[in-house]
Every structure is written in structure tokens, then in C-alpha cells.
Image (cartoon, coloured by chain):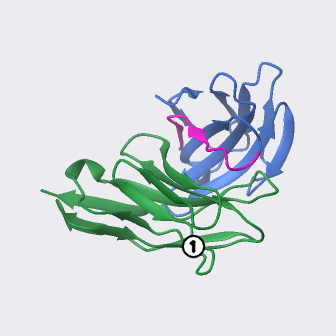
Amino acid sequence: DSGVTQTPKHLITATGQRVTLRCSPRSGDLSVYWYQQSLDQGLQFLIQYYNGEERAKGNILERFSAQQFPDLHSELNLSSLELGDSALYFCASSVDGHLNYEQYFGPGTRLTVT
Amino acid sequence: GDSVTQMEGPVTLSEEAFLTINCTYTATGYPSLFWYVQYPGEGLQLLLKATKADDKGSNKGFEATYRKETTSFHLEKGSVQVSDSAVYFCALTPSNAGKSTFGDGTTLTVKP
């Protein structure tokens, strides 16, 4: 158990809908990362927050947004969902926003868009 | 931009065989290098890391050495077990930003 929690575990929704994925980092970790893992594109970094502020942005679509709240939990919002958004979404956390600090991954949320 | 290239899989080995999974990287400066492992149905777990040139990371019998001259961080294990069957990801985190870059992952299957 990494100490990172993600809810829900599974999510099935229809095209065009909007969903929110939630992540609670390990106790004491200030940085949260979001990743998308799909069969055809591997593990893609989406976005990173550090202590409430956006720190780095990766291949995140404009239909997607995220935020980190004062209690350090984070939410990833996915809107106007398409079939291609079906994937595993992982949250990870680390102590700091820098870099020889390893990331601890949650168990993931499996999103299926039908 | 930064990139990580891993040996393509899948890799299938017999129990007690020697394992090497190649990883090379492109990055400016002095990144930190990581190997993560993903068991079926689970999230990624850190396996080992190295933060500077010539550092050797090791854990659970796995080793990898940070080779700056060849920009490589190959994963090795002397004797694999069935329980090592998983997907292995090589990753780097640059020295001046938060964006980590992961390789495509290498699936390892160990047969008894």
C-alpha cells in the first residue's frame, strides 16, 4: 500500500459526459501528479501540482483540468468525454516538487467511456 | 525534450535466468533515474533509483547503474523468479523541473 488513495476505482460513463477523479496523497507529500495509461500510448504525464500551485504540464487535453486543494487532495476533471479517453488514470505523490524524490503511485481509476 | 527509450518487450525468461532490460535516455543536465515496476492490476511502485553519475541503485536483487557517458540505466537481475513477472518502466526526472518522463514499459514474463 503506497499510501496514495484514488476514488473511484472504476468508472463507466457515456461519451460527452463529465467525470471527476479524486486523489489523496501520502501524508506529508506536497506534490501530486496525474498520469494517463492506455494500451496504445503507454504512461503519459498529464499535470503536476505542488502545494496548491500548478508546477508542470504535460500532454493534458484542454477538455481536462485539475486542481489541488488546501488539504492537498487533488481532483482531475475530464469533460466532453470521448471513447479514446478510456484508460487507467493514476495519481502519484512525492514529498517535494523536485526530483530525486520518488513518486508513490495510487492504485488508479479505470475509466471506460461507452 | 527529454526522452526515455526502453528495450521492447515482451521478454520471456525461465526461472533463475539472468535479466537485462535496456534503458537509454536523453536529457539536459543531470536527471535522476528510476525504475518502477507495475504488477498486474496495480499502480507503479518504485523499484530503485540513482541520482548522480556512477550511482548504483539496488533493491530485491535488481540493480541498475547510472552511466552518464552512455546515457544508460540498464536494469539487471542475476536470477529471476516467477514473482518478478510484471511491467518495468524506466523513468527520468530532470534536475530543474517536475515533469517526469517514462519509457513505454517492458513486460517481463518468467516461466517456472
Chain rendered green: B
Observer-nearest of A12 and B58: B58
Nearer the observer, A16 or A9: A9
Residue B45: horizontal and vertical position, in percent? 48, 43
Judged left or right of residue A111, residue B18 is left
In the displayed structure, does residue B82 sit left or right of residue A104? left
For image coordinates 69% across by 24% down, the residue present is A28
- Tell me if residue A24 comes above or below residue B72 in the rendering: above
Farthest residue to the front: give it: B54
Percent position (x, y) of residue B88? 43, 57
- The residue indicated by pointer 1 is B67
Residue A107 inside the magenta-drawn segment: yes
Magenta stretch in the rendered image: A98-113
- Residue sitting at x 84%, y 45%: A55
Q: In the image, is residue A97 above or below residue B88?
A: above
- Shown in blue, the chain is A
Instruction: Give the residue at x 77% y 68%.
Output: B29
Residue B13 rendering spot, x and y as whole percentages: 22, 66
**Quarter residue B54 falls in:** bottom right
Q: Secondary structure at mark 1?
A: loop
